[in-house]
Image (spheres, coloured by chain):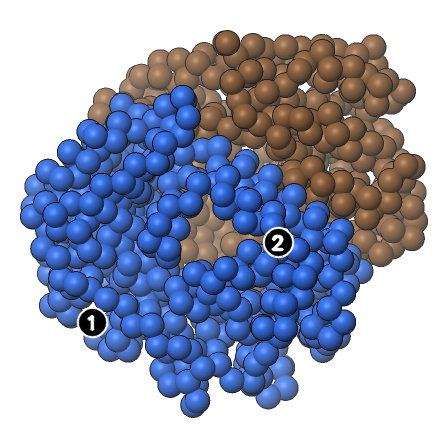
Chain colours: A brown, B blue
Amino acid sequence: MPIQFRQHTLANQLTVIAEVNPDAHTAAIGFFVKAGARDETPEVMGVSHFLEHMMFKGTARRTAEDVNREFDELGANYNAYTSHEQTVYYAHVLPEFLPRATDLIGDMLRPALRTEDFDMEKNVILEEIGMYDDRPEWVLQDKLLEDYFRNEQGGDHPLGFRVLGTTDTIKALTADQMRAYFEHRYSPDNIVVAAAGRVNFEALVADVEQLCTDWPATGAVRDYAEPCPVEKADSVSDEKLSRHYLGMLCPAPSAQDDRRYAAKVLADVLGDHEGSRLYWSIIDPGLADEADFSFMPQDGTGAYLAYASCDPARAEQVETRLMEVLDAVVQAKDITEDEVMRTKNKLATQATLQGERPAGRMQALGVQWSYQGAYTPLDEELAKLMAVTVDDVHELLADFPFTPKTVLRLGPGVAV
Amino acid sequence: MPIQFRQHTLANQLTVIAEVNPDAHTAAIGFFVKAGARDETPEVMGVSHFLEHMMFKGTARRTAEDVNREFDELGANYNAYTSHEQTVYYAHVLPEFLPRATDLIGDMLRPALRTEDFDMEKNVILEEIGMYDDRPEWVLQDKLLEDYFRNEQGGDHPLGFRVLGTTDTIKALTADQMRAYFEHRYSPDNIVVAAAGRVNFEALVADVEQLCTDWPATGAVRDYAEPCPVEKADSVSDEKLSRHYLGMLCPAPSAQDDRRYAAKVLADVLGDHEGSRLYWSIIDPGLADEADFSFMPQDGTGAYLAYASCDPARAEQVETRLMEVLDAVVQAKDITEDEVMRTKNKLATQATLQGERPAGRMQALGVQWSYQGAYTPLDEELAKLMAVTVDDVHELLADFPFTPKTVLRLGPGVAV
């Protein structure tokens, strides 16, 4: 039986989509809420992520222990995550447990939000923030996003907010602020339910209908203000570190931009973990332990991210080489047919390998719908990728020539 | 068509095994070499891992660039890893690429080991060791294993060696030492080739035969000396750290011991990431950001590992609670039917979910064969797990009462 796409929208605008594969041995479901750090105000920074935690603390008809025990009973691979752009709750189960998993997650999304749980969970969030302090690569990323999105010229773009918030914003956050944020953004017209694998779609829609039909739509919208990154280099000295960390962000196509396929190919040619230009230039000779270049498509905007970590003694050499590799390709436009073909083959096969599990397809489906508001089968996605030519990549380089660059250096004794 | 297990041993003792599933959409293959840190001497500590890197540097008929490009052409999810007990090279591909993936990995395992590549790659290894210095959880683990396996009483058990080696051992290592280690341990009687998914077994055996038939068997054996852990607590103060890290190791059943199923259940009841006794005691109230208890079965021996990280101000409180949870269950033997049943259901479903991909089955198959020298179908493995009773867990607690405990504390201003 072929894979079939199904879609149904409830009266309150909640959308249910599924890629039904009767040959699959499992099923996966996810609730994708368009609520992330970028939908916050500076005052409540971190509320989306904190709220994700609170969803596991019980509902009108379940205690926190119930939620926990039921996931165990379903034997689910389940989790939730919060990014700058969304909060996602998901489970991967045997097909017979899909209705119970749906009921559990759907119920969780109308949480009790008890003040005593809120006060208690605040400690957990503060612990999580504390944990970051010993992770230099996370410290670098948070500060780099801040530098790129929040600057003199571009104002205060919320993609520069910290997903976890800061110790100050979390301490100051009140339960009422959280409730107000929840009521506005966990609106059915701001959520998509995505399923994949061996799914009975009619039964799924009936279950979701019963659970969610009373949720009131609020017309929550997202602010699509343009970020205004500037050319700048910032250095943070931290004598506690043993290694030097380098990050760089610059503009790239958005998740809705057709040039995103070329951007994916280009980023892989330049900065894939193995066999890329950065790999041969920096990793293979042992100059750094990591040197990556990746494409980060986002909702209405996009960026390239370069990252390296190395011995502090080689900080300058690694940064110079990395920038040379990037600038050289913008100047020379010398990407080869062979590079493009290898990368496309690799990306295409990997998409197929990853598409094998319903859990992978569910994630792809939910993210795709959140960004595009439409479904594209894996075959069509791959056809678009395989259609990328060397000329497409060179045109992309002309449109997005890795500038302006926001650079951040973090290490012991870094010159400021 | 049902899943079928196949096995063939070449004249030189190289074993080829496969779990053939004609309904799978992909295929996975791995070469499992019984060569890890525990098979080294103190002088060449780190040679197994260094050697793993050298396998990607080319052979008599392939350059390093060829190896890299061919993996790209196959679009493979491929990688290699080295642990204390084995070195594994694997690829996950579309079924039509399995013969080429087999040829590539098989050829890689007869590497050129050129001295100039060895000298160059040494820098990469030293970079990798340097990277560890900013990762306190890795620093903790390395030192904890050292404390547990290498002590006054137990002598110098090689399970306490560092997989990466140290800066000193790597700097001193010669290419000739590596060649000697390679020739002895990469012997066909010390390697198993495991495949899973849509595999043509006869063709696979023919390919492996052609590639590997000339490899000489050396009769490489492993030293199964018993470790002699002692009760001790070590504290390392590092003012560079923001968080406090706690680790504890104590004896548990080995990978060959039938009590391993009960040990898996017990560890999950006490220390699973969600919903375990440690979770409710330490994580839920926000005392620490992590508090886990896990079972580490190894070849001929085994250990339980406890791990926590928290605000340094709560170091003592977290350690006290963690030890109380462990000691209380040894004293009270109060594990409930409900806890055992929930955990078994969870582990069983997760095994099924993970078994869905050929890549997962290949790994399970290779590791199982390395430890047991025999094949057990997933169904049978699960039946053994599901047969675990509360009495089994309590008997296990009597046999392995979390003692002696080797404790390591790492943090700023830790009292020594």
Residue B25's x, y, as percent? 39, 23
- The residue that appears at 59% across and 33% down in the rendered structure is A228
Establish if B354 lies above or below B11: above
- The residue that appears at 41% across and 85% down in the rendered structure is B154
Label placed on residue A244: none
> Can you identify the residue that label 1 sits on?
B173
Taking the image as shown, residue A51 lies to the left or right of residue A238, namely: right
Residue B95 appears in view: yes
- The residue that appears at 41% across and 26% down in the rendered structure is B2
Q: At numbered mark 1, what does the secondary structure look like: helix, strand or loop?
A: loop
| Residue type pointed to by label 1 | Leu
Q: At numbered mark 2, what does the secondary structure look like: helix, strand or loop?
A: loop
Furthest-bottom residue in this view: B152
Establish if A26 lies above or below A409: above
> Can you identify the residue that label 2 sits on?
B388
Query: Looking at the image, is mark 2 or mark 1 earlier in the sequence?
Result: 1
Establish if B134 lies above or below A298: below
